[in-house]
């Protein structure tokens, strides 16, 4: 109650005509972060409940925590001699390495969001709460901080603000940031050194996908791949941790289970097609292994299900997700120089999602028109 009284006391200074009216959007952002917004819908048809954007974003953050916390531990585990340290020692080491990346992502992204809201005199939306955490989780721990800052700025400005802000973007902002780093600074997000925080000491090693592309063998035990104690991007290695996040998202209804299931179905189907062809060692990799390695599971759960950039119709979600799975495995196998195809698959389908929904709706209209004619 004391905090509420304090907020109400200083609020007039940030309203129109107040001493700090120019910072109204900034004050409003902090107030709505602490409390439910005072605004209410007054026109049009709306479903009125407690699930506002803030609560949806917080649930997404909670769903990401298992993968993030395990990723911090894995960063410590992958260092030289990591297996000889305790769980807490490895976690603390990884925490100190990952935290600066998270801070840079949030500071840069929120600074741009707040500035943009002030210029437009609009509210600051909570969308970057998730994006700011996703960006650090889908890059290698060895990515330079200045590169993370530049990619974050590019993503927020070009992918979000140019299109009108949260809810208006066509492409997933976090994946745009990763794509920016990959295509602008390929050597800093690929190879055998970037996956380790202690790469300055010469610690290097290929990821499972790199090994699959080269030899058809991941080089890691399957239990390690499922648990996540293998080299990879910070939040993408543990299938178990990602599954925990998926259960929370499905239980709360925040993410679409149709998209998740169809992504895995598409990846499995494409893998089985390659198994049937079997022209090289990579095509002979068991289809289900594609679902475990790399960013496939992470992308299916947290990226493909982005409600802004995904298909909106139920039928469209099945098509959208299935094609992401198919394209991800297709890119992996057919382009060994780029073993991780999930990023490109999701971004490509982001662009096609509106078209998919258009044809789904058009097909429904045609079916209804036919039923009307028959009834007459």
Image: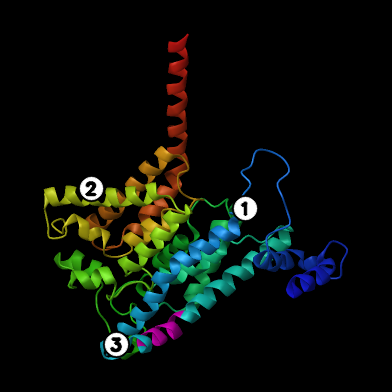
Q: Which label's residue is closer to the chain start, 3 or 1?
A: 3
The stretch drawn in magenta includes residue 321: no
Label disc, if present, on residue 164 of the rendered structure:
1
**Local secondary structure at mark 3:** helix
Whether residue 4 is visible here, answered yes or no, is yes
Label 3 crowd bin: few (<14), some (14–19), many (20+), radius 10 Å: some
Q: Report the magenta residues as a range.
A: 90-98
The stretch drawn in magenta includes residue 96: yes
In-image side of 189 versus 107 (left or right): left
Measuring from the top left, give residue 188's x and y in whole percent: 38, 75
Measuring from the top left, give residue 34's x and y in whole percent: 67, 68
**Local secondary structure at mark 2:** helix
Label 2 crowd bin: few (<14), some (14–19), many (20+), radius 10 Å: some
Magenta segment main secondary structure: helix
Q: Which label's residue is closer to the chain start, 2 or 3?
A: 3
Label disc, if present, on residue 269 of the rendered structure:
2
Asked whether disc 2 touches disc 1, contact meaning CB atoms under 8 Å apart, the reply is no
**Local secondary structure at mark 1:** loop
Image: 227 above or below 41? below
Q: Which label's residue is closer to the chain start, 2 or 1?
A: 1
The span from disc 2 to disc 3 (Cα, nearest Å) is: 37 Å
The span from disc 2 to disc 1 (Cα, nearest Å) is: 37 Å
Q: Which residue is mark 3?
A: 82
In-image side of 254 versus 246 (left or right): right
The span from disc 3 to disc 1 (Cα, nearest Å) is: 45 Å
Q: As rendered, which of 349 and 371 lies closer to the eye? A: 371
């Amino acid at each position: 109650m004391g905090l509420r009284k304090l907020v109400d006391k200083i609020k007039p200074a940030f309203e129109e005509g107040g001493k700090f009216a120019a910072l109204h959007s900034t004050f409003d952002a902090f107030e709505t972060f602490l409390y439910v917004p005072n605004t209410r819908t007054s026109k049009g048809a709306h479903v009125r409940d407690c699930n506002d954007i803030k609560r949806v974003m917080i649930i997404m953050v909670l769903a990401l925590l298992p993968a993030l916390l395990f990723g911090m531990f894995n960063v410590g585990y992958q260092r030289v001699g990591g297996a000889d340290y305790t769980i807490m020692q490895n976690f603390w080491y990884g925490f100190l390495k990952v935290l600066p990346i998270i801070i840079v992502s949030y500071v840069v992204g929120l600074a741009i969001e707040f500035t943009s809201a002030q210029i437009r005199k609009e509210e600051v939306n909570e969308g970057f709460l998730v994006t700011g955490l996703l960006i650090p989780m889908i890059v290698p721990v060895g990515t330079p901080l200045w590169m993370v800052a530049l990619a974050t700025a590019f993503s927020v400005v070009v992918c979000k603000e140019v299109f009108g802000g949260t809810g208006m973007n066509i492409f997933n902002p976090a994946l745009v940031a990763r794509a920016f780093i990959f295509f602008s600074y390929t050597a800093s997000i690929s190879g055998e050194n970037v996956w380790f925080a202690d790469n300055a000491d010469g610690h290097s090693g290929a990821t499972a996908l790199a090994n699959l592309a080269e030899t058809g063998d991941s080089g890691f035990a399957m239990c390690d791949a499922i648990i996540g104690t293998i080299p990879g991007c910070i939040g993408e290695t543990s299938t178990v941790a990602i599954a925990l996040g998926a259960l929370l998202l499905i239980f709360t209804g925040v993410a679409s289970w149709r998209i998740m299931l169809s992504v895995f179905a598409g990846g499995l189907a494409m893998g089985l097609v390659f198994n049937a062809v079997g022209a090289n060692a990579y095509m002979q990799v068991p289809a289900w292994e594609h679902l475990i390695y790399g960013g496939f599971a992470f992308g299916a759960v947290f990226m493909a299900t982005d409600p802004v950039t995904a298909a909106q119709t139920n039928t469209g979600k099945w098509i959208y997700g299935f094609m992401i799975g198919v394209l991800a495995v297709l890119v992996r196998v057919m382009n060994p120089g780029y073993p991780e195809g999930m990023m490109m698959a999701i971004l490509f389908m982001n662009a096609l999602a509106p078209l998919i929904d258009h044809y789904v709706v058009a097909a429904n209209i045609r079916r209804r028109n036919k039923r009307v004619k028959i009834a007459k």
